[in-house]
Image: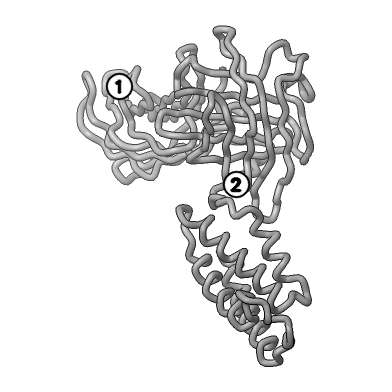
Amino acid sequence: MKRVSLFLSFFILLTAFKCDNEPYEGDFFAEENTISCETASQDIITTATNFDSATEDNYTELCTAYVEALENQITACGDADGSLKSTIDALGDCTYVSPNGNFQVDFDGQTFIADLASATINNEVINITGQSGTNGETVSLTLFEIIPGTYQLGVISNMNEPNSATYIQESGSSNTWESVTNFIDSQGEITVTEIDEANATISGTFHFTGHNPNSSTKEFTNGSFTNIPYTRLPDNYENEFFAKVDGVEYVETLIQGFRNNFGMIGFDARRNDEIISLVMDSNITAGTYTFASPLPNLPNGTYSLSDTDYHIAKGTLTITLHDVFKRILMGTFEFTAEPFLTGVGTYEITEGSFCVTYFN
């Protein structure tokens, strides 16, 4: 909304000059209902001020009123330097764009609109993810190209890896559809229209045919991602971990990530026999979760001083990044480690943070 404020003072000066000099006289205002330059100038101030405080609910309404006032200003007072027309063009069709970007796609007669969307870019891969609701419903796009252009989905184009799109109906379920069949026939395409380095956002469109393990298909159309914020990742990663146990730094000697055959991923931060361990669903996406220990409930957190002194987590886990192709987890956590089975005592695990890789 800042751009509206920047234009306000300019409009006041511009319209005051034109009105004081009364450049339009004679028959120009003879027609009934024609707005005078003075009235148009006042409307600009009013509508611009209203639009500057617009919310998602009234954005389109206030934007449309502002555009109409700009058009009236051009008719009544002129637009010598073209700045008013440029403002109208920048506002487009007055569709609200979230500060976190818009990610949506049509399927099954409805429109999937992401509540949360994010992206990562490294020297080889673009990953874009949109998540809706609290059950892990997710659409993700993976592109083995890092420049704007149109790319086919489901075919091997680079590094023996196929560009792909995936829909997950809910976290941990088998209700998934992916744009891959034989790695030869295209199942759709992604068009990256812009990678805005200055604002760290990415925009584009997509469509694809999703294939389910049960051999069913689903058509995804009119997909778009607009101004999705991205994180540019370094080429190489080193596992990082930090936590305090009862206020004292836990200095690990080994960080070991893993992925098992039960749809779980996670890592252990070990200090001899002492272990802080986090386990989560392999489809986990960015968000904040409550630990649901013990296993098989997820996400799961544990703190063990030995094989016989075992504690489960009561607290929260926040995932800030899950790159499923680079197998990277980033996030924070804190929990109370309560005794379980033969465990003794209670411990406070605080200031937890991690950036780790896991393997199959």
Q: Are marks 2 and 1 in contact (CB under 8 Å)?
A: no
Split into 4 quadrants, where in the image is the N terminus? bottom right
In x, y percent, where is residue 119? 60, 39
Badge 1 local density, few (<14 within 10 Å), some, or many (20+)? some
In x, y percent, where is residue 304? 32, 26
For residue 86, side relative to residue 226 (left or right): right
Q: Secondary structure at mark 1?
A: loop
Residue at x-position 34% and y-position 27%: 302
Residue 241 visible in the snapshot:
no
Split into 4 quadrants, where in the image is the C terminus? top right
Badge 2 local density, few (<14 within 10 Å), some, or many (20+)? many
The disc placed on residue 118 is none
Residue at x-position 54% and y-position 35%: 130
Task: Looking at the picture, tell me which residue is in the foreground, 283 or 138.
Answer: 138
Tag nearer the camera, 2 or 1: 2
Q: Which residue is mark 2?
A: 229
Q: Which residue is mark 1?
A: 294
